[in-house]
Amino acid sequence: MIGPAWDAGVHDAPLFLSRTTDPGSSRKAAVALTESGRASDQRSVVYGALREHPGCTSAELAEAMGVDRFMVARRLPDLRRLEQAVNGPERTCNVNHTRAITWYAAEDVVTCGNCAEPTHGAGGTCHHCKRDLAASRRDAAAHAEEAHETVT
Ligand SMILES: [Zn+2]
């Protein structure tokens, strides 16, 4: 037996509510990233991804996000203009295999304590200085080894 017309309305209502109140952030992000999404929504999603994937090229970031790389390539310069993103050094992109500029969220950028270059992340030491530091540690270990050998 088919119920009265209002019954259909009652059944539709919870469905409608669950759609519009879905708190899933991934769903919100997906909506924001559609072409119809507002540029400001796209920017905030790109910004969040940039904080999770510092030092990416725009194509790498798009791949990490699983979205259109042209959208990301448009939004990153927006963020730079708004002083929310900055460029890191240029390197070969792992997606396009061409030279490309890298990107960082501005708030994640610190100054290298060793050479004062802008850098990102742990310990505030840039990758050049980290490499030099690792090399000097290896040298020190090698010298210690030599010293040990001469003693025995
Ligand atoms: Zn440095």
Image (cartoon, grey):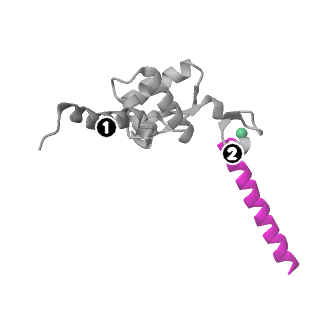
Does residue 52 belong to the magenta stretch?
no
Q: Which residue is label 2 attached to? A: 122
- Classify residue 27 as left or right of residue 50: left
From this viewpoint, which residue is outermost toward the top? 81
Which corner quadrant of the image does residue 19 belong to?
A: top left
Q: Amino acid at mark 2?
A: Ala
Task: State yes or no: discs 1 and 2 in contact (Cβ < 8 Å).
Answer: no
Q: Magenta-highlighted stretch: main secondary structure?
A: helix
Could one spot residue 27 in this view of the protein? yes
Q: Which one is nearer the viewer's eye here, 8 or 77?
A: 8
Residues in magenta, as a range = 126-152
- Classify residue 2 as left or right of residue 93: left
Image vertical order of residue 144 relative to residue 103, above or below: below
> Could you say where residue 90 lies in the image, as x and y percent from the top left?
53, 34
> Could you say where residue 11 lies in the image, as x and y percent from the top left?
27, 38
Q: Which residue is label 1 attached to? A: 15
User: What residue do we see at 50% from left, 28% from top?
Assistant: 44
Of marks 1 and 2, the one in the foreground: 1
Say which label, 1 or 2, has the lower sequence index: 1
Q: Indicate which quadrant contains ligand 1.
A: top right
Q: Residues within 10 Å of mark 2 (few under 14, many from 20)?
A: few
